[in-house]
Image (spheres, rainbow, N blue to C red):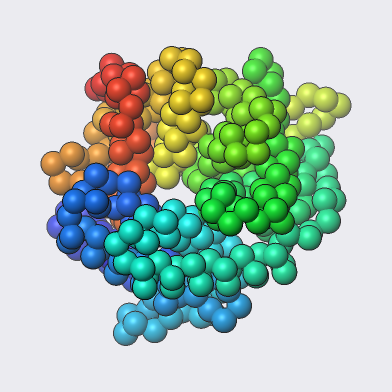
Amino acid sequence: MYIYSNAPNYTNTDAPGEGYTCVDDVSRAVLAYLRSSRFSTDTATRNKVYGLLNFVLEMQSSTGYFYNFLLTGNQINTSGSTSANTPNWWSWRALQALTEAGPIVKTYNTDLANKIDNAVNKLIDAIKQNQVNKAQTTTSSNGITIPQWLPAESGADQAAILILGLIPYSQSTGDDVIKSYIKKLADGIAMMQQGSASQTPYGCILSSGNSWHAYGCDQSYALLKAGLYLNDTSYKNKALVEVKSFYTWLLNSGMKSSFDVTNQSGTISLINQNSYPQIAYDLRPMIFASIEAYTQTTDVQYADIAGRLAAWFLGNNVASVTMYSSATGITYDGITAYNTVNKNSGAESTIEAILALQRVEANASVLSAMNKYKK
């Protein structure tokens, strides 16, 4: 599975200096196939998943963490900053794919399921050694208090993915150390919330430091899942503020890709605001959070927000361009400026769109809302 596919012919392309395929995207693909109705009925689909999972397993290093990129010639990129076996995005994404896949695959392929369990246990051991016992200290940036015990110190975005991988593991094993760590991560994410329902930036949960970026903004989705698992409504309540107030503000402002925040004498301001690029990986996390909010509350306003966000794929965006083709599966790589679309279709864009629309189509209220807002 190649990282990039370029218009107009959609030829497969590698990432110069990084590789041609990666754990990040293969793990995404695992989730998309697992969540498809075809997995349980189609042998060919299951075999694809087995191949993808075996790739992920082969990318695990002796430390327990994962390398990310595979170079042409099938050599693992062991030294690149976006590929090294460090506690980083691709290891958390591998964990999420493996912990979701393990119980499902066990029904069909016990040998592979056992390999998955071994890999997960190896990564969990590394997490316990290097992450779990970080002191809950804080620092300040532009007047914002920031936790220092998350991945990359203040990586609430990374912590969200990590939580989503740890919850299935903790549920299946009853590991109290990991359950406590999930709470610790959730506390750090919750600390990153700024403003309120009526005050800038409207309950936004920052991504890292004093910055927010749309890509990978799974913070609210992770808090909703953590709150449900830990039976702690405080996490859900924080997430609901972001979904209802911040996401609505984003939609009404034509979406943002990133900004920084400052706090001067109690007044929070936005600086360094950017509206582009807008990509599928911006929308999918917000759609997931909004649908989860609707699932947990049954409040239709969250279904409406989810549908409005999902309509971005169907032309309700600043470029008025349909970003996803149901006929081909092609998802454009993003809106790069007003009325300017990057018509390449990389693996990330395609799979993130599929993941989002799978979830939308499984919920009648959200699907109805999406169709109401599409152009």
Observer able to see residue 333:
no
Q: Which quarter of the image is occupied by the N terminus?
A: bottom left
Observer able to see residue 231:
yes
Q: Nearer the viewer, residue 215 or 320?
A: 215
Is residue 332 shown left or right of residue 304?
A: left
Q: Which quarter of the image is occupied by the C terminus?
A: top left
Residue 297 versus residue 273 in the image, above or below: above
What residue is at 60 percent from the left and 39 percent from the top?
229
Give how far across and how far down residue 280 sits, in percent.
Answer: 38, 42
Give how far across and how far down residue 213 sits, in percent.
Answer: 56, 42
Q: How many marks?
A: 0
What residue is at 40 percent from the left and 67 percent from the top?
113
Determine which quarter of the picture holds residue 49: bottom left
Give how far across and how far down residue 182 sits, in percent.
Answer: 66, 48
What residue is at 31 percent from the left and 32 percent from the top?
362
Q: Nearer the viewer, residue 183 or 110?
A: 110
Residue 208 versus residue 203 in the image, above or below: below
Q: Nearer the viewer, residue 47 or 106?
A: 106
Is residue 25 shown left or right of residue 207?
A: left
Give how far across and how far down residue 87 sits, in percent.
Answer: 62, 65
Determine which quarter of the picture holds residue 278: top left
Is residue 79 shown left or right of residue 34?
A: right
What residue is at 40 percent from the left and 18 percent from the top?
304
Determine which quarter of the picture holds residue 178: bottom right
Is residue 195 shown left or right of residue 320?
A: right
Q: Nearer the viewer, residue 1 or 255?
A: 1
Residue 85 versus residue 89 in the image, above or below: below
